[in-house]
Image: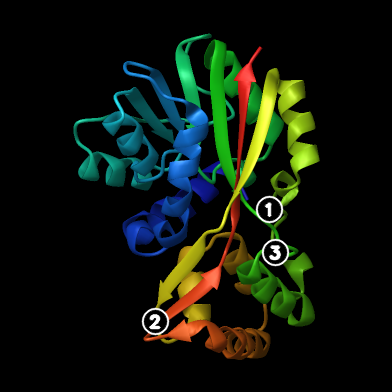
Amino acid sequence: MTVSEMAGRWSARAAVYKDATARATLQTIPALLNHALLFPGARVLDAGCGPGYVAACANLLGSDVTGLDFSQGMIDQAKEQFPYLEFTLGDVEKLPAKDQSFDRVLSNFVLFHVTDPILAMTEARRVLKSGGRFVFSQWLGPDKSECYRLLFDVLERHADISRADPAPNAFVLSDEENVAAMMQSAGFSNIRSETVENVLHAPGSSFYEFFVNVGVRVPLILEKQDSDVKATIHSEIDELADSYLSDGIYEIPMPSIVFSGTAI
C-alpha cells in the first residue's frame, strides 16, 4: 500500500476518530506529556497529530505547538477543533522543518504505521535542539494486550493473512530493548519507558463492527478474506468480546507504552 493510499484510509476515519479510536489513545496523553517535561514557550512538534489532541494539551501547558500529519482529513479535523493552533500537512519520515528548530517532538501512536520507524526517529532527532526530548507511544502486542490477543487469536485461526498487502510489523516497537537500540542509533540517550494501562471503551452491539470501522491493519486483512471466513471471524470475535460487555459498552484492556529520550 502506498503512502497516499494509507493517508486516504486515515482521512476516511478522521470524522469518527473522537468517538472511536480516541476512546483509547487519549488515555496515554498524560504519560506522554509527563515524559516530555514541557516548559512555557517550548517549541513543540506534534508529529502525526491526527485530530490535534496532543497539540491542544501541550498548548494548554504553555507550549508553542505545531501539528503535522500526512492525512488531509486529520488536518481538517484538527483545524476545526482547535482553530487557534497551527496544523500542516507533512510526513514524519521527511519532516518539513529546519535542523534544531524544536525543543520537543511528540508522536502519539504514529511510528508503528510508518515504513521506517528508525528514519522517523532520526528525523525527530534532526529537528530537535541538543538536549531536546522525543516522546512517542505505541500499543503493546497480543502477549500483553487482551484486546489484540482476542483479535489476532481469531484472525490467526481463520484468516489467510498472506492475502493482505504487506504492512509494517505493528508490534516491532512494543519491545523495550529493541526500541532502546533504535533510539540510541537515531541519536538519543537517557531512554525511558512506561506502561499505561489503557482500557478501550467501545460502544455498540458488535465489537467486530466497531474495530472494523476504526482500525487500519485489521480491516486490511479482513477485506481480503472470503465472505464465509469473514462471517466466522465476525461471529467468534463478538462471542469472545461478549464477556467484556457491560451496559452496551465493551471495556477491553488495551495497554500502551510510552518511550522518551534526550537528543544527544
Of label 3 and label 1, which has the lower sequence position? 3
Three-letter residue code for mark 1: Ala
Above or below — where is 18 with respect to 98?
below
The residue located at (67%, 83%) in the rendering is: 226
Tell me how the rendering is colored: rainbow
| Residue 233 position in % (x across, y down) | 64, 84
| Residue 215 position in % (x across, y down) | 52, 63
Of label 2 and label 3, which has the lower sequence position? 3
Visible residue check, residue 19: yes
Of label 1 and label 2, which has the lower sequence position? 1
Label 2 neighbourhood size at 10 Å, few (<14), some (14-19), many (20+)?
Answer: some
Q: Which residue is mark 3?
A: 164
Residues tagged 1 and 2 counted as in contact (Cβ below 8 A): no
Label 3 neighbourhood size at 10 Å, few (<14), some (14-19), many (20+)?
Answer: some
Look at the image and tell me in which quarter the C terminus lies: top right
Q: Which residue is mark 1?
A: 170
Q: Nearer the viewer, residue 191 or 226?
A: 191
Visible residue check, residue 224: no
